[in-house]
Amino acid sequence: MTKNSEISAIKTNPVPGVKSYHFESFNLLVITDGDVEYDNGCFAPGIPPAELKQLRENHNNLTAHFMLPHNIMVFTSPDKTIMIDAGNGDKARPGAGKLAGNLYAAGIKPADLTDIILTHAHPDHFSGLISHSGQLVFPNAKIHLHQKEFDFWQDDHADFSKSKSLLSSLQSLQQEIQFFFTQISGKLQLFNTDEPLFDFLQPILTPGHTPGHCMFTIISGNEKFIHMADIFHDEIVLFAKPEWGTVFDIDFDLAARTRQSILKEFATSKQRVFGYHLPWPGFGHIEKHNDAFTWVVE
Ligand SMILES: [Zn+2]
């Protein structure tokens, strides 16, 4: 898609929490898993809280806490139903865990899913794959994850020294992720960035937030957009101050550099992009004014 084109035609809104777009190569649903409140301390570690508050107030964001949306793409074509990430599942904190109900409302049954791509192995992206009783929610789906992401979390000597999170939190997170890998072992397919995963969908390795974090280029005819996954966790702070980062970044400095290069690239190209945690339904573009980047909703 170019900047000036409408997101490809036929927008319908079958239920709240589901957006529908028609493309030449596939139909796209964007489905919310809901919003989750995060403590301000998860963002801008090391920055005085008053500075963080001031920046958000300057952008008229007067909410006391960060509310993170969870925007999930589902591509349907005659032979495949492909989903990117799977939300928080039925163990979700209040506000989330809505994916399964919204899929059902959109006419998609769990057994219809053929492929699920994980942008990275954080629980707010994978927990929706496993039910409370430990069963696969989408029994027919292959689960795709970057090889580097799998290798990092499987390594009992993983390097957590470049994160600003507590080591004990990261160690328990790693245990949760390793257990998840055992639960999906029969379905897991690891990929490298060299080849498209599907004819319209190409991974781009963008390490920092996690070592195997991927964005995805999505192409239909002459339209193109980018799923940026977790490069940004809010629409204000990480655009204005990409170096302020989050405690979720496994390599804090690399995540900031990756974020900065993406801001520069997409502000120049005016590329239409999409964010998993950006305001519903997640589409927009990046602009630069007076040396500061901003998120522009489309
Ligand atoms: Zn996330």
Image (cartoon, helix red, strand yellow):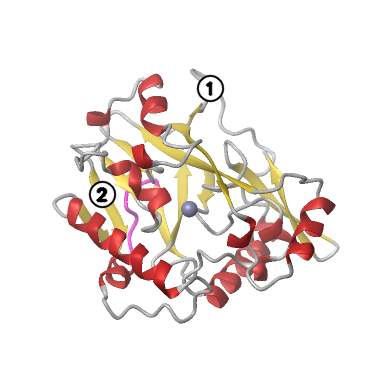
Amino acid type at mark 2: Ile
- Of the 4 image quadrants, the one containing the N terminus is top right
- Please, is residue 64 above or below residue 159 in the view? above
Q: Earlier in the sequence, mark 1 or mark 2?
A: 1
Residue 193 seen in the current view: no
Q: Is mark 1 within 8 Å of ligand 1?
A: no
Residue 206 position in % (x across, y down): 47, 66
For label 2, the residue is 143
Residue 94 position in % (x across, y down): 48, 37
Picture residue at 55% right of the left edge, 47% below the top: 277
Picture residue at 34% right of the left edge, 55% below the top: 196
For label 1, the residue is 16
- Is residue 71 or residue 61 the one in the foreground? 61
Q: CA distance from mark 1 to mark 2?
A: 27 Å
Crowd band around label 1 with a 10 angstrom C-alpha radius: few (<14), some (14–19), many (20+): few
Residue 68 position in % (x across, y down): 57, 46
Amino acid type at mark 1: Pro
Picture residue at 58% right of the left edge, 61% below the top: 42
Over which residues does the magenta segment extend?
Answer: 194-200
Mark 2: secondary structure: strand
- Of the 4 image quadrants, the one containing the C terminus is top right
